[in-house]
Image (spheres, rainbow, N blue to C red):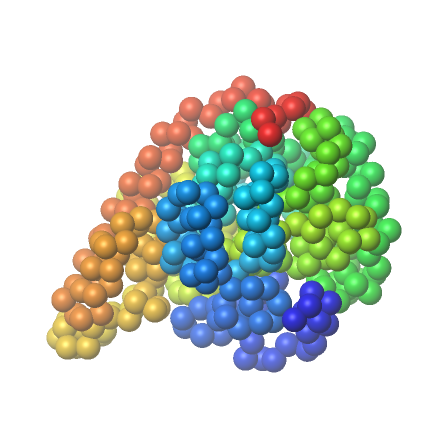
Amino acid sequence: MTEEQAEQLSQVSVNEDDDIVDPWTVTGKSETGIDYDKLIKKFGSQKIDDEVIQRFEKVTGKKAHHFLKRGIFFSHRDIHILLNLYESGKKFYLYTGRGPSSESMHIGHMIPFMFTKWLQEVFEVPLIIQLTDDEKVLWRDIKIDDARKMARDNAKDIIAVGFSPENTFIFNDLDFIGQCPAFYQNMVRIQKCVTYNQVKGIFGFGDSDIVGKLTFPTIEAAPAFSTSFPFIFDNKILPCLVPCAIDQDPYFRMTRDVAARLKMPKPALIHATFLPALQGAQHKMSASDANTSIFLNDGPKQIKNKINKYAFSGGQPTVEEHRLKGGNTNVDISFKYLTFFLEDDDRLAEIKKQYESGEMLTGELKKIAIDTITHYVQDYQKRRSAVTDEVAQEFFKIRPIKL
């Protein structure tokens, strides 16, 4: 399926039984969550299979990240092209981002950044991180100054993943665009290539939507072109790889169509699944509801209480029935969280076997999830405490970075 065909398919009326996945809404219709195979067909991307994973390992000489092996990053666009370029000695860069909507990010927000960090290390490439504080002003009742502050706070959260200013540049739209003429010029070039009917079809905009929403996609598209950052790339044309959650794909379908007209490389993409909300896999974890999410500034007691109280269980109604029938790991949120944050493959397989056989009870599974998530968050918080305003400012400086 071509991207044009996928775009036409996305404009067809949605069946009431279909999952809803777009940049603003993620809703699964099944208790097991989003049907990602169906989403691949709908969006026209390609599945990450064993062949792709083996190619990653051959090109990098590194063992594949557990996010790849477990299907957490499950879909791609043109990753083979990028791997071939890299194998031939040609450079590329990474671009990802975050729309700041809360003072603290939650653990679901970490998934793309954890994987991006791995990609940056194994390929030894530069990284651009965009904070779309302007998007949150346009879509929500948030003041500009508040959005800018949240962007700075979230930047510190992201830096604490382990990125270095040596090869990472972070910017927020509301401050950066006025400082970089080349970025704005590329925005205008993109705007000339996209019609109202196209953005309406891709994003579902209506006649009463404010004009800022219609033009915003060009702002998210611009970092996918290296010429938007002449102070980094010296106007050299480098291809780009975008690690992101699958709900961001519509922006880059548009970007890839525009790239050909601008005679720029199409950005390659690698898509992540969603970390589900505590209440069940039908929804992704959301910063707007504290009870659905585990935040990066939550303490051990909060994490324990949230998982014990809210994490949807795949266990049976009684201990006797659970021992007989076993638990359902396809819907159990504690187990799903372990697939993201427990790196030991053998231990994860053992937990799955014990829970599904009924040997392990829901309370025992929740305790393992609590311990695993608490350990991750506490380690993270130690790094976060070291990210001062001065440290963060180094990432925001307009400067060359290591290529």
Residue 101 x/y as whole percent: 57, 45
On the rendered structure, is 22 left or right of 110? right
The x and y percentages for residue 29 are 49, 74
**Is 376 situated above or below 332?**
above
The reply to whether residue 310 is visible in this rendering is no
- Residue 152: x and y, percent? 58, 32
Residue at x-position 22% and y-position 69%: 356
Residue drawn at point x = 43 percent, y = 54 percent: 54
Is any part of residue 202 visible from this angle? yes
Q: Is 403 in front, or is 329?
A: 403
Which residue sits at x=27%, y=50%?
344
Q: Residue at x 42, y 24 (%)?
A: 386
Q: Which one is in front, 217 or 241? A: 241
Q: Quadrant of the C terminus?
A: top right
Q: Quadrant of the N terminus?
A: bottom right
* As drawn, 57 above or below 41: above
Q: Determine the image quadrant of residue 252.
A: bottom right
Front-most of 62 and 118?
A: 62
